[in-house]
Amino acid sequence: MRMIGKLMAIAVAVLAFAAAPAMADETQTYSGTVGTSPVVVYLESNDDGVSGQYFYNRTGFDIPLTGAWRGDTLTLESRTTEDKLALHRIADGLSGTLTTKAGRRFVVTLSQASAPASNPGFPEGLTEYQRLRLASLTLTPGEQQTIGGRTIRWYSEARSGTRLFRIESGYPKAVLMRVNAALTQTQWSHIDWWFGCPGWDGGSGVENDTASAPYLGDTIISYRWNASWGCAGTAHPDFGIEGHSYSAGTGAELELDDLLRFGDGDVPAAQTSAWYGYRSETFGPGVVALLERHYPDAMRVPEDDDGCDYTDADVWNFPAWYATQQGLYLGASFARVMRACDNPEWSVIPWQALNGPAAPQGVDS
């Protein structure tokens, strides 16, 4: 999320419960209190020590921790808040003290967390720690909007401000159910990321995470997220776009290879070595040739080394993408030093140039 899906990996760091050094990996989720404030703690231990994070229920933001067992004492410290914890085992958990940067001390009592009730709207793969963070939050329906005769409604989460639409009319019921379920899971993922990317100031490090209004075509449903963030502990702020597209006939989420492909034969299975070879040796050069045909001026080689060279096939191997009224948008991806060149506004492949099995026949409406 360099798309937001990739960017969300930033959201979860882990902390660990260990019985002794030199042991197999072990994880544990705790709930309890620091002073009188409820907290949830996720600990992970391995041969290298203990790492993880915790959050106060009142804020939800991750506070990263690292440390180790020293005899019967687990010592942990946060690089962002400079909190220090000294914990010992109790019957079903841990107890001890937390000392703040200012020297204030609080009693800590933690017990093994009880798994929250299952929420069918949550994405698969959330940890118990993440589910506990999201369990008290709700998605609230808001304004309705009509786009090309089809109706959507926006839903928002109050604490993060994360906002995403659901489609209420214009497609078969089965398609609406499948697409809306995917939209709900994606929204919860972005909410969790907002809390899981803490800033240095105690709030979220996510500066912007905005979903566009959707493109609602006869064959494709598509939208994008624009995001910028600077999570505490990362080297640099970052930004990116992430697109999601669905078949209007089945509701299934589409892949780029479903809409655009180059070369002879079938595209190799995704994430295989053959697929990576196809992307770098065939797909990227194919995109360059296609864009040179439709945008000859924008695709000229820059006269100086500081210019954006969109003729470099490597920047198109793994583009951000989403559907628009005009066609398929592809976003270039440059090395960090040239990040200002990412995602130019003009790089839209016209509908009639698409040739994948899910590409519209003619111009999508």
Image (spheres, grey):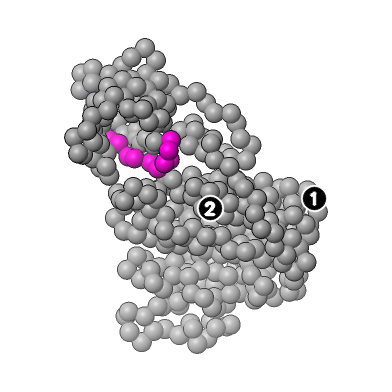
Q: Identify the mark nearer the N-term, 1 or 2.
A: 2
Looking at the image, residue 242 lies above or below residue 123: below
Question: Which residues lie in the magenta part?
Answer: 57-69
Q: Residues within 10 Å of mark 1 (few under 14, many from 20)?
A: few
On the question of residue 315 being in view, the answer is: no
Above or below, comparing residue 290 to residue 150 in the picture = below
Q: Tell me if 151 is positioned left or right of 80 in this view.
A: right
The picture quadrant where one finds residue 289 is bottom right
Mark identifier at residue 173: 1
Q: Residue at x 64, y 59 (%)?
A: 245
Q: Which residue is nearer to you in this view: 244 or 203?
A: 203
Left/right placement of residue 248 relative to residue 73 reads right
Q: Nearer the viewer, mark 1 or mark 2?
A: 2
The residue beneath circle 2 is: 162
Q: Position of residue 124 (x, y in %)?
A: 57, 39
Query: Dot 2: few (<14), some (14–19), or many (≥20) neighbours within 10 Å?
Result: many
Kind of element beneath mark 2: loop
Q: Nearer the viewer, residue 38 or 2?
A: 38
User: Label 2 is placed on what type of residue?
Assistant: Thr
Say which amino acid is labelled 1.
Answer: Lys
Report the residue at 44% width, 45% height from top. Answer: 195
